[in-house]
Structure formats: C-alpha cells, structure tokens
Amino acid sequence: MKGHDPIPDHSTRELIKSRERRSLLMFGITLGLMIAGVVVSVFLAACFGRMNIPDAAVFQVILSRLGPYQASDLDPSWMVVVFDIRLSRICLSALVGLALAVAGAAFQGILRNPLADPFTIGVSTGAAFGASAAIFIGLGADQVFGLGLLPLAALGGALAALFTVVALARVEGRLRRDTMVLAGIVVSTFLSALISLLKALDEESVSSIVFWVMGSFQGRGWIHVAFALPYTLVGLALVLAYARELDLLSLGDTQAGQLGVDVNRVRMRILLGASLLTAAAVSVSGVIGFVGLVVPHLVRMTIGAEHRPLLILSGLLGMMALIWSDVIARVVLPGGEELPVGVVTALLGGPFFCMLLKGKKEAVSLD
Amino acid sequence: MIETASLHCGYGDHEVLRGISLEVRSGEMTGILGPNGSGKTTLLLALAGVIPVRSGTIRLAGRNIRGQRPRWIARHVASVPQRSDVSFPFKCLSLVLMGRYPYVDGWGRYSARDLDAAVDAMEETRTSHLAHRLIREVSGGEAQTVTIARALAQETEILLLDEATSNLDVARKIEVFDLFAEKNRAGATLLCVMHDLNLAALYCKRLVFLKEGRVALDGPTVEIFNDRNLSEIYGTQIRVSAHPVTGAPQAHFVPRGNCAPTDRASSESVSGGGKC
C-alpha cells in the first residue's frame, strides 16, 4: 500500500509459500506416522487378553489370515481367539473411534462451538433411545434378525433427535448455535429419562439397555464391523466432501454465505453425515463419551483449525484412542471382569476435558 | 452495477427495509449513512444474498440475484463485516484464503493462483507478516485488516463495507480507505456503510442516507452534505465547513446548551463569531 514496507515484497511471498510447503510436508509426515500408529496399535492390542498366547503367535495368526504367510504349528483355538474375538473387536473399536472423532469435529465446526459433540446436540442419546425402544418392544430378542434391526432403530433415533433439535433451534427461519446446544441438552436429558423409564418397565432387559447407555465392545464381532462399516463410510464421505465448507461455516452463517457457501444445504448434509457416523458407532457399541470431544480438540491444538487435515487426523487419533481404551477396559480389572469402555473414556477424558475447559476460560479472560 | 427496486427485507415480524430503490453504477464509491437501526447493515446483507428478499428485486451485474448460486454472487460481491468472531485457531493466511472459496474446484482445493491472490491481498493491506500467526493471537485491529484482505482476495467488482474500519486506529483507517479509493479508481464499485460522517464525506463522492428503512436522501456529497440535511436526519444540531486541505465538507456537532468549556476568545475564533 505504501512504500515504507520494511521487507521487500518478493521475499515475503517466497517466505509464505515456503512455509505453506513446509506445513504440507509436516502434515504428510504426521499422516504417515498416525497411519503407522494405527497399524502398530492393532497388532499390539491383539496381544492383550484373558487367554495367554505368546506375542509372536498373535502376529503369526494375524499375518496368516491377512496374506499368503502360512503358519504351521499354531493352536487352532489361538486362531479363533486372536482373529475372531480379539481382532474383530479391535477393528470395531477403531471404526467407532474414527466415526465418533470425525463426527465430533464436524459438529464442533458447524456449531462453532469447540465444546460441542454428538452428545451435546442429543444425537448419541437419540441413537441409544432408538435402540432401547427397539429392545423394549421386543426387536432385540432374536439374535440374527434383532441384530439387523437394532442398529437401524438407533439410526432412526439419532436422526429423529437431530431433526427435533434442529426444529427447536430454528428461530425465525435461522438456526442459532447457542439455541441448538441448549435444545440438544433438553432433548438428550428427556431421552435419557425415557431410557430409564423403559429400563424400569422392562426389568428383564436391563443389562441390554445398560449396554447401550454405557457403551461396550463386549461380545462384539465381525458381523458388527460389517454392519457399521457402510454407514461409517457414507457418513465419512459426506463430511469429508464438505471439509472446506466446514472451515467457512465455522465463521458463522452470515460470513459463510457472503463467501459463497450454500449455507442451509451444506449444513444439513454435514449434519446428516455426522449423525450417520454417530448412529453407526452407537448402534454397535452404545454411547461412548468424550472421544468426539477430546480427540478433535487435541488435534486442533496441535495442527490448527483447518478441517481437511483436522478431520483426517482426528479420525486416526480417534481410532488409536478407542483401541487402547478398549484394551484398558478388557485388562484393568484383576478378576478378569470387563469394564464398559464408556467408563474408561469418561475416566480418561473427563479430567482431561476439565483441563481444556480451565485453560480455555483463562484464555478468554485475557482477551 | 447494483440496482434495487422497492426492496423489502426483514427479520421475523420486523420489516427493516421498506422499499429501497437504489442504483449504483460501476466504479462509484458510495457512502451509506443513517442513524442506528435505519437498515444499513440489512441492506448490505440483502445485496450479498445472505438474507432473503421479501419483495422487490436486487440486480447485480445485470442479473436478478434471486435464484443465483451463492458462489456466483460471491464472485461478484465481497463483504467486510463489522466484526468477525473466529472461534477456532485459524492461521491468518487460511482466513484470507477463504476469500477464494468461490473459485475452488470440486475437491475444495486452493490453486497456486488462489494462494497468489491471497498473498497479494495481504501485501496490499500490509498484513503479510501475520500470514502464519493465529487469528486469536493478533490484535482486534489486525484481525479486522485480515478480514479486509479476505474480501480483496475475492477479487470482486463490488465491495460492501460494513463499518469496515470502525475498530482501526486513525492512521490505519486512512491507510485502508486510501487503499479502497485506489481500488475504486481501478474500477471497483464500493458501498460503504459508515457512522463516521466525515470519513464518508472525505472519500465518497455520493452519499445515501437511510432513515427507518427508506432512502431519506441520495445525491452527490457536495450537494447534500449540509447543515440542514444532516441536522434533520440525525436529529441533532450539525454544522458543516470545508476540509482545510481537500475542501470536502466536514460535519461538526454542536453540543446542546453551552459551548465547550474553553475560554471565550478561542471559542469565538473557532465558531467564526457565531451565535454559540
């Protein structure tokens, strides 16, 4: 603008461009490390379990099932335990971690609220209620048929909760983010009460409902992975397709609109994608808290707020977070009993989140 | 080119714009003035297509904006909001790059051309040293200048400024408006909502006064910026005199009752021997 700029123009430009190239390289390296971290986590997590199987044998079993590697002298029961019980459960927890973390990042961006996640806006509780209602009317009774319908009921509950919250939050034709969080709390409190009511009315399936509310991977297998996978992939595709729009929407509707985003349409699609991810996760594992809240927060603090890298790295970190939370849930109790994984994530994530909240408050008061 | 014809807009039961007909030709730099609640911001939002038109029409670049895609509008009109709250740790460069959203491909990727446009805009506004700082870590004035850079990066024919410089210090204010004037000489059409009457009179050749959602006054600054019009619109006594350097009309507010507590001699010399 004026001639007294201390730095010559071309060098500033080169500096900016080289820093951009460097941050792209850093993202590439981080991405590679995180993918490696997920793979290593899968193998290591498979070594933990009630049955005492040598680590080398665990790796041999996994490799023999994955590729042409032939393991000769392995105990057939090891094959079943490692592959069908442990590995399926690890893959499921990775899938759920991915879905919850990406959904959390998406909800946070769209609500412009770093503290929002599938629970704050009632989608998780909606899914859990859908499942509980299905159990109550007897859909969960049949082992094969019920398994197919329960997650669908969870999906229906999630979407119903989402649209209720959206309808409640729509003031004069516009969605307001603060009203939406408030509406989410109202809806999820109400649905939690309804779940408790169902629990009281139908004492026989209390344990089944507790499973939905606390979240667990106990007794889950490949069939659950197969059910959750397509929903997760569709939800992931929807959210990732609008990653750039999420950046702009996190500035608010008005500015996003001024910058050319078709606000109402894009927002509904992102909300749908994120709900699909939540429903897929809740339908196979129940309500698992804090993953969708803490994981995106950590990633954002490290690499910044741009949603393209944020969503991808949050997904990978979410996978690792839930794989290891489930390992803790499996082995932490001395008697061989299992904790619901939702207890582990809440115990780990709760204090951590308080720390974030505290730090955030201080930062705000300094402004 | 901006044309509105009996434009009505509002929120809920509250109708803010009540029949605005306005024509702004390409290359004009027009100030939009008026008391609080007169509909200035609403007018800019309607022109940017972010609030719906209730009745009447808005035409940009010869086309009715009803039914146009938001991206099309954003390639023709850039807006600088009064203030911009960013809840997340974005880099300043990322925010400026968002001005390139109307041009991104289907994958949402910014091209080398987009990066160049963003860096150009940051250099023009002298914010390029902030490129890799987080928006939360820069001052309010710097953040506002980054928002201005974002609008320039949009490379649009029309710029809508809503109190774009109200939280900048005086030197930055003049610097930024010099830049706007330069853009205007290069062919840009600017519509500036302003509270600062004198800044408006200094830079805008045409002024539009809104009052209660209608155009109260519209014309060349030198003709309409006078004691009588200003006093009537703002409902307080205002005197106008020429700017000592540029000769542009400048408004002076007259306190009710007594004069400012200066000694009588200097007070008389300032008011030119007037009644006060």
Image (cartoon, grey):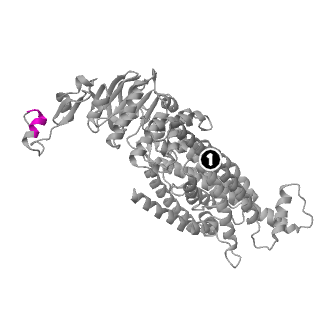
With A177 as the anchor, is A124 left or right in this view? right
Taking the spot 36% from the left edge, 34% from the top edge, the residue there is B177
Q: What stretch is highlighted in magenta?
A: B266-273
Q: What element carries label 1?
A: helix
Q: How many marks?
A: 1
Q: Is residue A252 left or right of residue B9?
A: right
**x and y percentages locating residue A124 in the rendered image:** 57, 57
Residue at point 36% right, 22% down?
B23
Vertical comparison of B174 with A118: above or below? above
Residue A173 shows in the view: no
Main SS category, magenta section: helix
**Callout 1: chain:** A
Residue drawn where x is 60% and y is 55% of the image? A101
In which quadrant of the rendered view does residue A348 lie? Answer: bottom right
Query: Based on the displayed image, in which of its 4 quarters is residue A316 positioned?
Result: bottom right
Q: In this view, does A316 lie above or below A249?
A: below
- Residue A131 vs residue B187, the one in the foreground: B187
Q: Is residue A52 above or below residue A269?
A: below
Question: Where's the N terminus of chain A, which quadrant?
Answer: top left
Name the side, left or right, on which A2 lies relative to A192: left
The residue closer to the viewer here, A133 or B260, is B260
Residue at label 1? A22
Quarter of the picture containing the C terminus of chain A is bottom left
**In front of the other: B105 or A15:** A15
What type is the residue that disc 1 sits on?
Arg
Number of other residues with Cα within 10 Å of mark 1, as a class: few under 14, some 14 to 19, many 20 or more: few
- In percent of width and height, residue B221 lies at 27, 25
Residue B222 image point, x, y percent: 24, 24
Q: Quadrant of residue A18?
A: top right
